[in-house]
Every structure is written in structure tokens, then in C-alpha cells.
């Protein structure tokens, strides 16, 4: 698999600051208030940026990234664990993404369904999933799970909500951007994968562990991105 320009997105500063240290940046472009940095990582052309938090920021950011020439997208960041077998520091690699807060059930649609759209669950690229899983195996001894990433403009911090999301969607983790990235990539027929490192268990204890583990989790996500680019 060969790509002419690998797109990399992080939602927060912590998630991409290591890219600034390792990418040989040759140019930068500012659009919609987002700075896109282009350069080379392991000798391969990349373009990376910080999307900001939430689905709208992620969608705008992704479309501009594709307009600037990215022909695949790797999204890295942190998330709250939904699958009970996941622990803080574990990795989730997206098999697919869905918006858990898309709710038009009063009109007869199942939760998560985007009315009148061709699909509501967006599958990640199999080869990128394979590369991410191999990277996780090399770096973290297989502390990863390939599963469904749930996105919504909510910070999940309730055990009842976690159970509901797991029971309803069989989701692996919850975050605030991945499904928007996936949706835009799907509309443009561009392969993607979402890689999330668990910073908390989305169970009401985030105030205790989120800040402490965000830097560590972001570092884990970066290491996987770096390894994927190396082997892509």
C-alpha cells in the first residue's frame, strides 16, 4: 500500500506534540483557524494537525486535510473505555465508527442511525487496521482491542451510560471525534483508522485519572502512529 501523503489528526495538543519533535516540517497552511503541517516522517510525506475537540471541529478539519492532498487518515488520541475488558493504557483500534448521540428514535430510526444517509456505521480500512494491530503488538505486547469506536459531543462519566452504550452498540470506547473523521473519509472514499488509548474508564472516575494518564495515553497513541508510518 502506497500513499502520496499520509494525514494524521490529533484532537488535543498532547496528542500531536511529539509529531512536532519528529517530523521534518517543510511547510504549513492555516485554514479555518487550523494549522496543517507538512513534512516527512521516516522519509514519507505526512500532513498533520490538531482538530480541536468535538464532531464539528473534527469534520471541518478532516475535509480540509483531504483537500490538501491527504489520501489516508490516521486519527490518534485518548478515549474512555466502554468494553469492560479494557483498562487504562490499553489501545482501541477502530473496526468501525458510529455516532452514539445521533438519536432520531421518535421517527422510528434506531439509535445511531443517520436518517436518509447511505450508512451510519463507517468501517475502517482493513490494511490500516492490520498495521495498527501489528504496531500495538510490537510496542505494547498486544494490549489492544479492535472494536467499534463510539463518538458523541459528550464526555461520558456515568456507569449507567457506559452500560447502555455497551449494550446498545457493543462499543469498545467512547470519544468525541472519530465518527466524524470516519464519516468525512467515507464520503470522500479515503481509507482511515482511528487509534485511541484509554485514559479513563468512562465511569465517573475521570476526574481522578484523566489528567494523569492523558500524557501517557497520548504518547502510546503517537508511538503506534509512528510505527504505522514506518511500515506503511
Image (cartoon, rainbow, N blue to C red):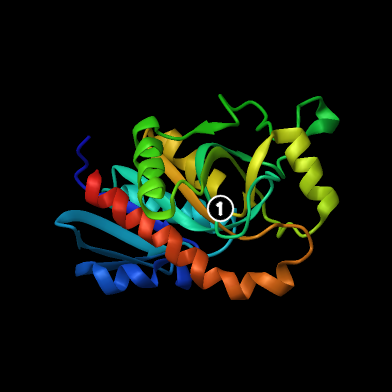
Instruction: Tell me how many marks there are.
Output: 1
Answer above or below: position of 215 versus 188: below
Could you tell me which residue is drawn at 24 percent across and 67 percent down? 23
Q: Is residue 100 left or right of residue 142?
A: right
Image quarter where the N terminus lies is top left
In this view, the residue in front, 182 or 175, is 175
Q: Is residue 165 left or right of residue 189?
A: right
Residue 51 lies, in percent from the top left, at 47, 62
Could you tell me which residue is drawn at 52 percent across and 33 percent down? 122
Q: Quadrant of residue 191?
A: top left
Could you tell me which residue is drawn at 85 percent across and 32 percent down? 106
Is residue 103 visible in the rendered image? The answer is: no
Q: Residue furthest left?
A: 43
Q: Residue furthest front?
A: 141
Q: Is residue 1 left or right of residue 212?
A: left
Residue 176 lies, in percent from the top left, at 61, 55
The 10 Å Cα crowd at callout 1, few under 14, some 14 to 19, many 20 or more, is: many
Q: Which residue is mark 1?
A: 177
Q: Quadrant of residue 164?
A: top right
Is residue 62 visible in the rendered image? The answer is: yes
Residue 95 lies, in percent from the top left, at 51, 35
Answer above or below: position of 13 versus 171: below
As helix, strand or loop, the secondary structure at mark 1 comes to loop
Residue 60 lies, in percent from the top left, at 47, 54
Amino acid at each position: 500500500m502506497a500513499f502520496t501523503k499520509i494525514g494524521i489528526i490529533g484532537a488535543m495538543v498532547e496528542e500531536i506534540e511529539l509529531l512536532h519533535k519528529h517530523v521534518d516540517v517543510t511547510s504549513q497552511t492555516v485554514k479555518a483557524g487550523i494549522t496543517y503541517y507538512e513534512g516527512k516522517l521516516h522519509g514519507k510525506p505526512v500532513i498533520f494537525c490538531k482538530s480541536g475537540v468535538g464532531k464539528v471541529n473534527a469534520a471541518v478539519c478532516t475535509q480540509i486535510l483531504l483537500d490538501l492532498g491527504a489520501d489516508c487518515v490516521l486519527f490518534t488520541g485518548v478515549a474512555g473505555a466502554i468494553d469492560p475488558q479494557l483498562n487504562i493504557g490499553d489501545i482501541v483500534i477502530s473496526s468501525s465508527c458510529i455516532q452514539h448521540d445521533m438519536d432520531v428514535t421518535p421517527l422510528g430510526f434506531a439509535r445511531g442511525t443517520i436518517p436518509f444517509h447511505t450508512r451510519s456505521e463507517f468501517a475502517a480500512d482493513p490494511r490500516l487496521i492490520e498495521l495498527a494491530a501489528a504496531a500495538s503488538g510490537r510496542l505494547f505486547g498486544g494490549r489492544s482491542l479492535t472494536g467499534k469506536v463510539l463518538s458523541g459531543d459528550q464526555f461520558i462519566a456515568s456507569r449507567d451510560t457506559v452500560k447502555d452504550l455497551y449494550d446498545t452498540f457493543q462499543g469498545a470506547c467512547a470519544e468525541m471525534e472519530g465518527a466524524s473523521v470516519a464519516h468525512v473519509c467515507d464520503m470522500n472514499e479515503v481509507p482511515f483508522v482511528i487509534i485511541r488509548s484509554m485514559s479513563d474508564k468512562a465511569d465517573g472516575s475521570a476526574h481522578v485519572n484523566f489528567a494523569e494518564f492523558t500524557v501517557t495515553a497520548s504518547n502510546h497513541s503517537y508511538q503506534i502512529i509512528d510505527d504505522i508510518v514506518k511500515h506503511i
